Amino acid sequence: MRDSRLTEQRNPASSRIDELDALGIVDLINAEDHRIAAAVGEEREAIARAVELAERAFRSGGRLIYVGAGTSGRLGVLDAAEMPPTYGTDPAMVRGVIAGGYEALVRAQEGAEDHAGDGAEAIDALDTDERDFVLGIATSGTTPFVHGAVDRAQERGSSVGFLMCTYPPPDLVERLDVVIAPLVGPEVITGSTRMKAGTATKLVLNTITTAAMVRLGKVYGNLMVDLQVTCEKLQDRGERILEHLLDVDRAQASDLLDSASGHVKTALVMGRLGIGAEEAGRRLDAAEGVIVRVVGDLAS
């Protein structure tokens, strides 16, 4: 079972996992999971570069587009789907592409990842250009669908990157704008990359989008202020944010949100500066959405 890909190698620590009781299996998996955060931390500079590429794409009117297959594709779609409710973004701003289409989110589409041409076609369908940042995700580093997509995106002028959990080929590192390779080691169950590699992937994607959204001014202090109230949970969160930052009661916070059409960021500027929603919107636009430039820091 020799394979140069780290994700396909056997883990000696789990070579007799089938002889353990339930607690022993849990402890073994947990011990291996402790390696993940450190491996991601080793890639801090590459991840920061990806954040910069994503921010640049957003500020130029482009998109962050994840492309993956299987678990990698599902995690990309998940991260993209969480952006609108969390940060009030347009759903088109962060996109997830998965080999086999959205049916593959709930049922494995065997063989869908094997065709580089399909990945290229998916990129053509999105009409990518120089404003976009396309990040391929393939923990093994070899998925044809993902390589086809990344190659076509680069041909179309997009910034391109790759996220894998094995040793990156030097030519790939040389050719792409960024390669992120957290080396989490062989899986507890050989080749089961939904485990450590999947967890590392989610950590990296969470960091890229969170950091980019902070850079875009969608966070004030450490509060998610650029959210649009669309359900009771977000209504409650928005009101609590305004109560805390403006020192108002719940009824006043609710009124401010209503006046701001449910947009917490606008309501915050209105309450802090005593202005209407239209003027608050103008000031936020002039500050490129960075709220601290409009109302000062939390201590002011």
Image (cartoon, rainbow, N blue to C red):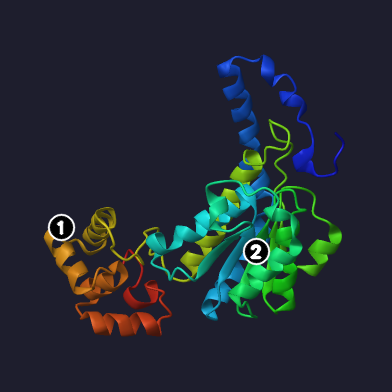
Does 2 sit left or right of 189 as displayed?
right
Front: mark 1 or 2: 2
Tag 2: amino acid: Leu
Does 64 sit left or right of 5 as displayed?
left
Task: Report crowding for label 1: few under 14, some 14 to 19, many 20 or more residues within 10 A (C-alpha).
Answer: some
Tag 1: amino acid: Arg
Quarter of the figure with residue 272: bottom left
| Mark identifier at residue 75 | none
Does 156 sit left or right of 22 as displayed?
right
Q: Is residue 46 above or below residue 256?
A: above
- Considering the image in quadrants, where does the N terminus appear? top right
For the residues labelled 1 and 2, the Cα–Cα distance comes to: 42 Å
At 36% across and 59% down in the image, what residue appears? Answer: 223
Does 143 sit left or right of 29 as displayed?
right
At 71% across and 24% down in the image, what residue appears? Answer: 14
Callout 1: helix, strand or loop?
helix
Residue 195 horizontal/vertical position (percent):
62, 38
At 67% across and 61% down in the image, what residue appears? Answer: 136
Task: Report crowding for label 2: few under 14, some 14 to 19, many 20 or more residues within 10 A (C-alpha).
Answer: many
Find disc 1 in the rendering and name its residue. 250
Find disc 2 in the rendering and name its residue. 135
Q: Among all residues in the image, which is located at the extreme left?
A: 251
Q: Nearer the viewer, residue 256 or 88?
A: 88
Callout 2: helix, strand or loop?
strand
